[in-house]
């Protein structure tokens, strides 16, 4: 007996242009928009659950900002040491090359021993050519005042005519020694590089890139106007860091990725990971007896503001430093789970979690390696000093300077590793719970499950598919 075969179903993706065929427009229209547009919305129930968690958290962050808002950086009398010096802009107007012995006749003559750094410097000064630079102050009350600066031949910074420099001012010094060159003015190249970065972000990211730059500016504002002044005012560095990092996280994620359930899941994953980092940091920084006062800069901070808890400042730095990478990991994992669900709506939470965690393992390997190398690169001069001293690995790791970086790296890496399964599980539970709350209309009397009357856009309408999605083994049962 010859039977007429039914026409084959339409392809899963609708044509780019034109009107979809009659009877399939509703389901295919939604499928297209979900694949190329924003994430599919979750149910009203799940939105209420997410809001019940995030709204109190956001309220607590706002209250913390209001209560701990410092109102500005506390003033102090300048010490004239290190960064705590008055500085002005200046310009090198003239450079002369003269024998060093004519510029420094009172210097102790060399003894011929060049095996030490002091001996080499003395020999170079006695026989080399030095530079005598005339520098003009271009800002401040002494604008137009000139002074001279002697540059030794072995000096790492060699000045040239027309160069913009930064000079330090010490009012208590003799008149001829009140000004000295401390650095080069790098404002123009730094501003140009920042402009290139902003242009690249906007050209590639378009509107998302613009929002990312806005979020970056807000993050710097929170850091400059809240976190740093609040710590200087004497507030607990850990509390300030948690509140400030939470504010940055909420603003940056929702501003860049929208007020959606997908972003809310990423926020929850980031929050849980930050709490873990805070707990581990508090435990191991105290256990390892890390003081946070390890160099001249931290010593100057402690001298100016003795009430600051330096170990708490170290922990605050760990939390803030981990936040940026955490945002990247949690957003990526959440997006991966959402896309997996849209590609195969029959997958349950177990299937989504297994697929998402496979993606996360690759992400973990690259992110941890990046974090470790970033800290190693920042501490490279210090590691070179230990290498020159031929210290053993155990001696190097036990020193507080290196131990701080090791603890910082390991705690941040543990938080990053934990954020992958946590965020993936949250995203899988949210997506699968939303899918299973939709009733199976094929069992409702009077409902048609014909191809032209799909009960849920972009979702299967059969009871078997629904049961498969609940069990997490949709592919096996579909067979």
Image: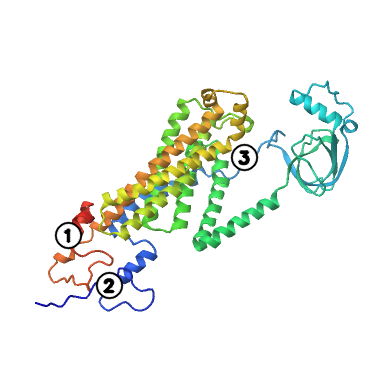
Q: Nearer the viewer, residue 74 or 121?
A: 121
- Point out the tag, 2 or 3, that comes first from the N-terminus: 2
Q: Which residue is mark 1?
A: 464
Please indicate whether residue 303 sits to the left or right of residue 458 in the image: right
In this rendering, the answer to whether 22 lies above or below 195 is below
Which quadrant holds residue 299?
top right
Rounded to the nearest angstrom, the CA distance separating label 1 from label 2 is: 22 Å
Q: Secondary structure at mark 2?
A: loop
Q: Which residue is mark 3?
A: 74
Residue at x 84%, y 36% (from the top left corner): 130
Q: Nearer the viewer, residue 128 or 68?
A: 128
Rounded to the nearest angstrom, the CA distance separating label 2 from label 3 is: 70 Å
Kindly report which numbered mark, 1 or 2, lies closer to the viewer in this rendering: 2
Q: Nearer the viewer, residue 323 or 58?
A: 323
Residue 207 visible, this orientation: yes
- Point out the tag, 3 or 1, that comes first from the N-terminus: 3
In this rendering, the answer to whether 357 lies above or below 151 is below
Please indicate whether residue 435 sits to the left or right of residue 134 in the image: left
Q: Secondary structure at mark 3?
A: loop
- Point out the tag, 1 or 2, that comes first from the N-terminus: 2
Query: Do the CB atoms of the residues marked 3 and 1 lie less than 8 Å apart?
Result: no
């Amino acid at each position: 007996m010859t039977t007429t075969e039914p026409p084959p179903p339409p392809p899963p993706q609708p044509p780019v242009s034109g009107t979809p065929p009659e009877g399939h427009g509703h389901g295919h229209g939604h499928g297209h928009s979900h694949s190329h547009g924003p994430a599919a919305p979750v149910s009203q129930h799940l939105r209420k659950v997410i809001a019940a968690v995030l709204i109190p958290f956001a309220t607590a962050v706002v209250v913390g900002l209001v209560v701990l808002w410092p109102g500005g950086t506390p003033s102090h009398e300048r010490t004239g040491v290190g960064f705590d010096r008055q500085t002005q802009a200046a310009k090198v107007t003239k450079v002369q090359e003269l024998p060093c012995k004519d510029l420094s006749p009172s210097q102790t003559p060399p003894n011929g021993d060049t095996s030490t750094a002091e001996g080499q410097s003395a020999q170079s000064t006695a026989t080399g050519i030095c530079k005598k630079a005339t520098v003009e102050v271009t800002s401040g009350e002494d604008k137009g005042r000139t002074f001279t600066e002697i540059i030794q031949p072995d000096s790492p910074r060699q000045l040239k005519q027309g160069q913009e420099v930064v000079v330090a001012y010490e009012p208590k010094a003799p008149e001829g020694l009140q000004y000295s060159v401390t650095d080069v003015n790098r404002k123009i190249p730094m501003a140009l590089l920042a402009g290139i970065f902003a242009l690249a972000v906007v050209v590639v990211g378009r509107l998302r890139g613009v929002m990312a730059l806005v979020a970056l500016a807000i993050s710097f504002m929170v850091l400059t106007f809240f976190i740093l002044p609040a710590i200087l005012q004497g507030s607990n560095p850990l509390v300030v860091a948690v509140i400030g990092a939470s504010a940055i996280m909420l603003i940056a994620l929702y501003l860049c990725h929208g007020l959606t359930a997908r972003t809310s899941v990423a926020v929850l994953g980031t929050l849980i990971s930050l709490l873990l980092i805070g707990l581990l940091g508090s435990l191991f920084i105290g256990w390892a007896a890390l003081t946070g006062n390890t160099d001249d800069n931290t010593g100057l901070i402690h001298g100016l503001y003795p009430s600051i808890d330096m170990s708490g400042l170290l922990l605050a730095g760990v939390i803030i430093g981990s936040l940026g990478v955490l945002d990247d990991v949690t957003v990526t994992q959440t997006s991966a789970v959402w896309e997996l669900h849209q590609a195969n709506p029959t997958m349950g939470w177990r299937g989504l979690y297994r697929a998402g965690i496979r993606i996360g393992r690759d992400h973990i390997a690259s992110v941890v390696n990046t974090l470790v190398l970033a800290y190693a690169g920042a501490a490279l001069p210090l590691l070179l000093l230990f290498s020159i001293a031929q210290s053993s690995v155990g001696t190097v790791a036990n020193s507080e300077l290196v131990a701080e970086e090791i603890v910082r790296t390991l705690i941040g890496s543990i938080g990053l590793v934990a954020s992958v399964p946590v965020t993936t599980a949250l995203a899988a539970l949210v997506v699968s719970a939303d899918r299973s709350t939709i009733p199976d209309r094929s069992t409702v009397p009077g409902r048609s499950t014909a191809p032209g009357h799909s009960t849920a856009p972009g979702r299967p309408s059969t009871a078997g598919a629904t049961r498969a999605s609940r069990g997490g083994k949709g592919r096996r049962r579909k067979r």
